[in-house]
Image: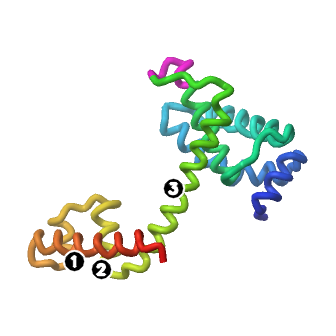
Amino acid sequence: MTYSEEELLQGIIKGDAATLRFLYREYYGPVAHYILKNQGSEQEARDVFQDAVVLLYDKLKKGTLTLSCKAGTYLHAVCRKMWLKRLVVLGRFGGKIIEDNDYEQEAEEDSDAFSEQEEQLKRMSLCMSKLGEPCNTLLTDYYFHKLNMEAITEKFGYTNADNAKNQKYKCMQRLKRYFFDKA
């Protein structure tokens, strides 16, 4: 089952078990991945996620939180802040300590940035699909798979690396036109 954002938030406020299961199923994985990649354990990931869900519940129940992003984006931002603070407390991170009362404001700021990034990624994906071949594959190979020009030259059958660079440049120019043309 899926939920609209409104249904999800109402289910959280009501403490609906099915809604909470959905919340964990959909949003726990990325948080756990982030914490595990940043010196954490599975148990620490569960604890941080649980704390963030409780914080979200409390804020929604009290009516002190108006989300300008998706609940999952907000949860991820709060978990990130909580995890960074925990790393500082545990002596595994040398950054700034984030005070508890800063979570909501910073999470809102982060979630706005995440929402903007999500929109840009969607737009970039659409633009990449408009490019067609070979540009889509060439740019993906170069920027995401980190293939060098020699490998791209061989893969696409260009006569030399300079020709491959020239083609990459032309593809990038087309991509920029698609991306920055708001039409």
Would you place residue 17 above or below residue 7 in this image?
Answer: above
Which residue was labeled with disc 3?
117
Q: Tell which circle, 2 or 3, labels the residue nearer the N-terminal end.
A: 3
Residue 109 vs residue 137, the one in the foreground = 109
Disc nearest the viewer among 1 and 3: 3
User: Label 1, label 3: how many angstroms apart (C-alpha)?
Assistant: 31 Å
Could you tell me residue 45's position as x and y percent? Answer: 62, 36
Would you place residue 43 above or below residue 112 in this image?
Answer: above
Q: Is residue 5 left or right of residue 174?
A: right
Q: Amino acid at mark 1?
A: Phe
The residue located at (46%, 69%) in the rendering is: 125
Q: Are the residues tagged 2 and 1 within 8 Å (C-beta)?
A: yes
Circle 2 SS class = loop
Q: Tell which circle, 1 or 3, labels the residue nearer the N-terminal end.
A: 3
Circle 1 SS class = helix
The residue located at (41%, 69%) in the rendering is: 180
The colour scheme applied to this rendered structure is rainbow
Residue 176 vs residue 142, the one in the foreground = 176
Could you tell me residue 108's position as x and y percent? Answer: 64, 42
Which residue was labeled with disc 1?
156
Magenta-colored span: 87-94
State yes or no: residue 91 in magenta: yes
Q: Amino acid at mark 2?
A: Pro
Q: Amino acid at mark 3?
A: Gln
